[in-house]
Amino acid sequence: MVTTVLFYAFAAILLVAALGVITARNPVHSVLFLVFAFLQSAVLWLLLEAEFLAITLVVVYVGAVMVLFLFVVMMLNINVEELRSGFTRYLPLGIGVALVVVIEIANVIWFRSEGQAFVTPTPHAADYSNTKELGGVLYTEHVFALEIAAMLLLLAIVAAITLTMRTRHRPGLKVQDVPAQVAVRAEDRIRVVKVGPVKE
Amino acid sequence: MIDYALAAPEIFMTAAICVVLIVDVFLRQEKRWITYTLSMFALVGAAVVSLLFGTDSVATTFSGSYVADPAGNALKLFAYVIVALVFLYSRDYLERNGLYKGEFFVLGLFGLLGLMILVSGNNLLVLYLGLELQALSLYALVAFNRDSAAAAESAMKYFVLGSIASGMLLYGISILYGIAGTIELGPLAAALTEPGGLTVPAIVGLAFVIVGVAFKFGAVPFHMWIPDVYQGAPTPIALYVGSAPKIAAFALAWRVLVEGLGPLHVDWQGMLVILCVLSLVLGNFLAIVQTNFKRMLGYSTISHVGFILMGFIAGTENGVRDAMFYTIVYVLMATAAFGMIILLSRRGFEAESLDDFKGLNQRSPWFAFVMLLIMFSMTGVPPLVGFYAKLVVLQSVIEAGLVWLAALGVVAAVVGAFYYLRIVWYMYFAEAKDSSPLVAATDLRTAISVNGLSLLALGLFPGYLLNLCASVLG
Amino acid sequence: MESIYLTIVLAPLAAAAIAGLLGSKIGRAGAHSVTILGVAISFALSLYVLWGLAFGDAEPYNGNVYEWAKIGNVTIAVGFLIDNLTALMMVVVTSVSLAVHVYTIGYMHDDPGYQRFFSYISLFTFSMLMLVMSNNLMQLFFGWEAVGLVSYLLIGFWFKRPSAVFANLKAFLVNRVGDFGFLLGIATLLYFAGSLDYAEIFAQAERIQGETINLWGATAVSALTVACICLFVGAMGKSAQVPLHVWLPDSMEGPTPISALIHAATMVTAGIFMVARMSPLFELSEAALAFVIVIGATTAFFMGLLGLVQQDIKRVVAYSTLSQLGYMTVALGASAYAASIFHLMTHAFFKALLFLAAGSVIIAMHHEQDIRKMGGLRKYLPITYWTFVIGTLALIGFPGFSGFFSKDALIEAVHASSLPGSGYAYWCVLLGVFVTALYSFRLLFVVFHGEERMDHHTKEHLHETPAVVTGPLIALAVPSVIVGWLTIEPILFGGFFEGAIFVRPEHDVLGEVGAEFHGPGAFVAHALTHSVTVYLAAAGALVAWFLYLKRPEIPGQLLERAGALYRLLANKYYFDWINENVIARATRAVGTGLWRVGDQLLIDGLIVNGSARAVGAIASAARRVQSGYLYHYAFAMVIALAALIGWFALRG
């Protein structure tokens, strides 16, 4: 009973936070709403006994990704008005489509699921370790998927570097050569020339 | 026990990517050919490994998440050939346009690895990861030319839309997992056939999965990225995006829809019929009004996707075989068509307008003829193989009782003839805008000639390829 | 064996491809070497195949080499049917082709299109082999059209001459008429037999004969008769039978080797071959046979007459070809298929010989073809003269020469026939013998004997042609003399074509002739004592000698007396005039009318432009969706998803 109440409460906050992400006028506020939404999802996962995922979500997304994101948003001077110009125009249609989807899903869940059993899972014992179980299947049953994920990360690194690192070796382009500057000596810069007397 | 030998091609490819990646770091620009050569060797090596470790039977490993079967092996071998062609066609162009970097080949191989995983994936999670692995490398490739605003814009569109599509796919997978309690394809199908398994929520999950599949194919209305990406990306990358991933899309549809969601055939048949009709109609009509050749090819792809879907719509063993046949044929044609653009391009000049084909016959009668073969094959003129591909898919939908769809397909093919034959008309009957002769490397000329002639050879002997498709699938 | 058959077909094709595509690289010598090699390989292997079938223990072969397509229950395949009939044709085609290849080296020596020419004639050899070796109607049709195409290209080989272009267009158009009939015939057979394969069609011949087609209202006609007559219309086009013969004399615009190879020895006999091949069908339809025999007889006699008034050396030979093709057709109509093929074979040799000899004369005369400017060439061109004499004797049926055996057997067979129309045919072929001898000796005497009428300049340069020209002449002269004596017995009476050609017992006229046959020597003796043909031929030769050597002023006087008849002949019975002024004009009028109303008003105006406008409208509407805005795209995807769920999840 308590879990049900908690679930609906946090789910409601999650929805509000998600709405906030797209309605906030200030992009920084949007990001903060997103952080908020992540936190709510983490709580929902806790309620589902997925403790490890919940902690990971908070540590990785809230702690690392979103902070980085926040920096980026603050550094870029985003013109909010321009971004929002389409928003109000398409709002009615968007709401309409969203409502249709909601009605469809709701319809399916409540009226069309005859014969489909949604069994409530039995809670685990107190000494059950979600992390250990997850580690168990991750490195045995799903080891192939895990390896692919590793390649995915490698690919992400390669792609990011490819798209961002610029080597400036184009001929004619003037660049600063720091080691050369440091290694320079006075005699390279100044040449003392003895000039004989000049007679007119 | 895990049988690593079954996954030998993927393991080899992973190792090869790492080697290419590391070697490339230590190379100076003028030694870049080493990366190219190494990548080619990686493809040849993968082919050797696939042939050595290929099985005649179906076997799974990695706790049922990987499946090795003859069809997968054949698709992988075909994919090596196509990627090798892509690299070969691209090298010259990349060099001329200052894009000759090792990352192109590394990303290309990454995409191939994703394709291989997708082809051999036996559970929904692995399929999803394979799809992402390929998609991510494609996004990076499209944005590869950082000095081009058009490329960046199209990469952005591709990335965002692709993310939405894969998010929907993932959501669909989660619904299916919730219903069936498994993500492995065989057990999933078994669970759906059990009494009470086929329910409305499963169809909702299916709808989401279809979005993912259709996006990968580029079927209307999930096609919007195709014309923009084809036009925006540098030609070698459009070539890559337009060729190998179609094999991946076929594999995804085949694994997920036929093998995993077979019991829902009636439902996905209906959905695919809608996508197929829209693709045929919109793809063809929009292709007519294009003036950019790459964009036209984009819309033509969409209409070809309509034909590939026809094979799946039938859903029978023959239908899947026909879809596979069409996919292979289409990929060959698309590779050749993009190869022709590269051949016509020069430094700083992209031959991507339809006008650039004018008077090609005066400049190079041989390549005008090769282009004629490609265009005739795309139209579906016998005895080129494109005709045969259309014939078999049309037959399969007729067998499925959808005569009206076959009739529509024929009408679409006739409409399509207009814009393909317009190119032929330009080549032979219009005055050349510039009459300079074609200059291109010998390997490029040879490869394109062989590529074009293969369309004729396969058309004269279509039985071999068709029987091959049937035997590896059966 | 399959690989041998494939080699036979593909060797000339490969040679043609090399000579045609790489012509400029391999040069003249390269082009003729490679094509001659290709044809020589085919010839040697064809001989081997024929030897195996005739003397060895090789079995006839019937099988598909490659299945190209399967549409419904109909298989379109490339396959070979190799029996004695095919093997004989293969040897005839490749041997004549080989001789012509060698001859061409000399004839086309100075022509700029040397490599192109060799490529074409090799391509022709390939097409002709595909035609004769086929085991199904589709491939037959392919070969049929391919030889027609090459013929078209070669007639117009000197495409800068307007007359050549006119002639090749004419050949093309007339053949289209024939091909239309041919295609109808194939379609009829396909419809009733459900197959294109010879063996499968023949197996159902009896049943097809029972089926009927309503052609005019309620008049039911046997489907088999319709199919056979349609097929024969195709043969009429290709084998130049009246009234579709008009293209053949004009085809002499092409280079002479072509006239010999295509328009005398091989391609024009394709129709004869096809009817013989289809004998199991024709045998069942007397109406079709009667049609065949009447057309053939008309061609044999009336076209021979035209040879009398021609002044162009090649045209005389061309009309003689028409007449001889008529003979073959008559034999077909009389169910003496073997006699027809036998005559086809002997004719191929001696007619090729005559054409090549005529070509040799033309070379020596510096491409002058008018016989009024020749005369007395005997002493300048001895080899050409003697080979020409041999060809002429073979043509008129001098006892012992090859033409004698084939023609005499053929006439006897027609005599023995009791089909409707055979009486008319018998008189036509009999009188034709006289006419043949008359025009043949007229040509011989006018060209090689009598007064020398060429101009001074030509006369100075007259000398025998080179060895590459005379060599093939001699090579062809040998079979022209002996091939009849050697082969009449097995081919006509020895059951050589058993299994390949089918004759119903009541039509077996050759059997009747064969009952009185006791060896070639006795055949000659029998002809001298019991038959009128030899004496008719002798009379023809004698009249020619009298008119053109003894009293050369008589022909001119005859012309004045019989002006109307002469005009009729000189205008070739006004066939061309009718074609050009009636048929062509009427067709053009109908065409113009249809174009105005159908094309411009309906199709262009309503359908093409209308649909183009519709396409434009749809496209511009659809284009608006492809706006380039990311959120439009994403939105479209979400809407589509909602629609999919709405439709499929909530419908039932």
Image (cartoon, coloured by chain):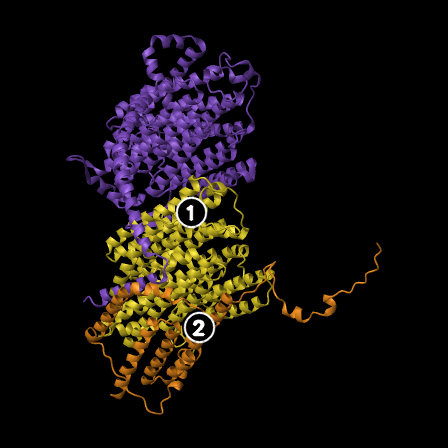
Chain colours: A orange, B yellow, C purple
Image quadrant containing the C terminus of chain A: bottom right
- Check chain identity for marks 2 and 1: say if they share one: no
Type of the residue with mark 1: Leu
Give the number of marks: 2
Nearest the eye: C77 or B66: B66
- Check the image and report above or below for C633 versus B414: below
Q: Secondary structure at mark 2?
A: helix
- Tell me which chain the residue with mark 1 is part of: B
Estimate the x, y position of residue B368 in percent, counting from the top left: 46, 44
> Mark 1 = which residue?
B354
- Residue located farthest toward the left when viewing the structure as drawn: C218
Tell me, for residue C44, which label it has, or none: none
Against B173, residue C92 (above or below) is above
- Which residue has dot 2 on it? A74
Q: Residue furthest front?
A: A200
Q: Amino acid at mark 2?
A: Met
Spatial CA span between label 2 and label 1:
45 Å
Q: Residues within 10 Å of mark 1 (few under 14, many from 20)?
A: some
The label nearer to you, 2 versus 1, is 2
In the rendered image, residue C43, in percent from the top left (x then y), is placed at 47, 38
Q: Position of residue B236 (x, y in %)?
A: 47, 57
Task: Say whether residue C584 is left or right of residue B83.
Answer: left
Q: Is the residue B124 above or below the residue B322 in the image?
A: below
Asked if disc 2 and disc 1 are in contact, CB closer than 8 Å, the reply is no
Of C206 and C27, which appears nearest the observer?
A: C27
Q: Residue C584 sits in which quadrant?
A: top left
